[in-house]
Structures are given as C-alpha cells and as structure tokens.
Image (cartoon, helix red, strand yellow):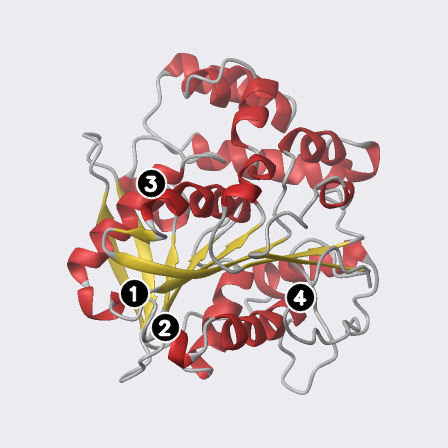
Amino acid sequence: MNQSSSVPFDIPVFNARAPWFGGDLQTLRNFFMVEIRGAYENPTTSERLHLPLDDGTGDQLLGDLTIVPESLKPLVVLIHGLTGCSGSSYVLRSSQILEKSGYSSLSINLRGAGPGLKYATDCYHAGRTGDLVQALESFQKLRPDLCEAGICLIGYSLGGNMLLRFLGEIAGQGNRIAGIGVHAGVTVCAPLDLMATSKQFQSTRNIFYHRWLLGRLKQDILGLPLSEADKDKIRKARSVYEFDDIFLAPRFGFGTAPQYYEATSAGHALNAIRVPTLLLHARNDPWVPAESYDACDFTGNPDLSVFVARSGGHVGFHQRHPQNHPWHDVVIQNFLSQAVPEEKWKTDF
C-alpha cells in the first residue's frame, strides 16, 4: 500500500473479497449487490427529516436520521456522491455499521437528490457547501440534543470534495457551524482535481461507466422544474463534461466547465482545514485518478492524514472480513475512536 502521509493509527491491510478482484469489480459490486439484488435496507431506526434551505427558493433537503438511544458520541453526518442519495449502498452500509458502534448518524440528500427531488427547484454541485451549512442549521433547530457532543462528517466521492471545501471554510469560524462543533472529517475516493477526474472518466476504458453515469445524471436533473431551454441543453449533452460546460457551470456563474472545476476542486481547500481529517483512496480507482493525490503536498497540514490503498476501486473496498464490513468503514471507525476520543469531544467545544 502507498501511504501518502502519516496516519495516527494502524490501518489494516485491504484484501479483496472473492470474486471482486480489481478496481472495476470492486466498483461494480455496489451496483450488482444492491441495485439488482437489494442487499441493503434502511436501518429500522431511520427517521426522515425535512431540512429547509433559507435561500428564498423554498427548497428542502431530506435527511435520514438513525438514532442510537442514550448515545453520548458525536453525531456522524454522511454525504453521498454524484447521482447518489441517502439510499446508496455505501451510505446505508456505513450508517448500519456506525449504529452498531454506538454512533447516531444523519444521511443527507443533497439538493434535488434521491427522495429530495420533489422538494427542490434546483440541483447541487461540487462546491455548493452553503446547502450543507443551511441543512445543519435546520437540523440544529430540530434536534439540538443530538448536536451537543458535536459532529463528524463523512463524504463519498463528489460528496467528499464538498466536505473538504466545507471543512476549509469553517476553519475561520473556530470549526463551528450553527453552534455545532465539528470534530473530524473523512473522505472516501474524493476527486481532489475535478478536471483530472473529468479527463479520466471520459477515457475509452471508462466508456460504459460514463454512459451509465451520464444517463443517471440526465434522469435526475430532468426531474427538476427547469425551463425547456435548459432541458434541451441537458438532453443534447453527449458527456458529463458537456453537461457541466453547457448547463451546470453557466447556471451557477462559473462560465465554463474548466472554470467550474478550477473554482470548486477540493485540492485548493486542503491547507485551510483545521480539524483531524482522513482522506482514503484506492490506487486502482477507475474514476478518480490517484495521481491527483500524488500531486498534493499534504505534509504542510498536520491535521490531514492520507492513505492510498493499492486496491479497492471507487468507493468499493469490499474485503474479506468476519462481518463483511467494507474496509473503509473499518478504517473510519478506527479513525473516529483515535481522532475523537471521549475526553476530546466532551471538552473541545
């Protein structure tokens, strides 16, 4: 394995679970096991919350809250990736494992994602951290009791990009948002360089992935109450890059796709982060190039810990384990117990 910077605890070796060998099968297992077979279900204690956004649109984010009764541990907030939602397999699995470890969790659907589509007039993008801020503010008003011990956040893929930017932004606010103390962050396969990720995703070897993701992206966005002109742009997009270039970037004032990627890439926020943050990635991720991790100098920020495993695919990490827990979930539990021990979350804020 390649360890990009020091990690403050022992990381277990990742051994792929048969027959899911290689980056592609690791990536595809989520689809085969969940989208087709429905392997995971929502935790029985899950409660659906409506989190209003205070931006004049009337939009709401939906969150799935899983409560561990009488737990005094920090709440863990989960942020899905592109075309994902709170019902994505990797989110559900993490929520279930965290629940068994005594952590309550809030799985947020970003604007217009999943079940939140009918409560939105607009969509999320890689840098729309204001939605996360407003969702946490709304949650604090609804359940202040669950915010007393502070929060930790986990972001997957594009949600990880958003999380890193969010952590960099709140550093100047004492790592607090809406009166909630933020203890730590974890990302799984976050694209630190969106332009590099876009180029890799459009490579010939990813043609089937690209076709599938573009179809999902169009399906999601076309469900919003957009103008016919915007819908026509979306239908005509022949790639995710074109979708970003002709629709997403100009819609949010970025101009072009390259300008959008440059403005919202998480790599620019890394030096500003001031809470313990763990970045996990796989060398054979077919979507997000590991070279973008190699290109970053993480040594200048002692709050960052980075680990790039030799294998695992994109948000896969399906391993041989007595409980069949994905490797990244095991590492996350270890990190939270080390980075946010009981004496820390009781006194930090």
Q: Earlier in the sequence, mark 1 or mark 4?
A: 4
Q: Which residue is mark 4?
A: 7
Q: Residue type at mark 4: give it.
A: Val
Q: Local crowd at mark 1 within 10 Å, few (<14), some, or many (≥20)?
A: some
Badge 4 vs badge 2, beta-carbon distance below 8 Å: no
Q: Which residue is mark 1?
A: 349
Q: Local crowd at mark 3 within 10 Å, few (<14), some, or many (≥20)?
A: many
Report the disc number at residue 74.
none
Looking at the rendered structure, the secondary structure element under dot 4 is loop
CA gap, disc 2 and disc 3: 25 Å
Q: Residue type at mark 3: give it.
A: Asp
Which one is closest to the eye, mark 3 or mark 1?
1
Badge 1 vs badge 2, beta-carbon distance below 8 Å: yes
Q: Is residue 82 visible?
A: no
Q: Which residue reaches farthest left?
A: 141
Q: Earlier in the sequence, mark 2 or mark 3?
A: 3
Q: Position of residue 72 (x, y in %)?
A: 31, 80
Q: Residue type at mark 2: give it.
A: Trp
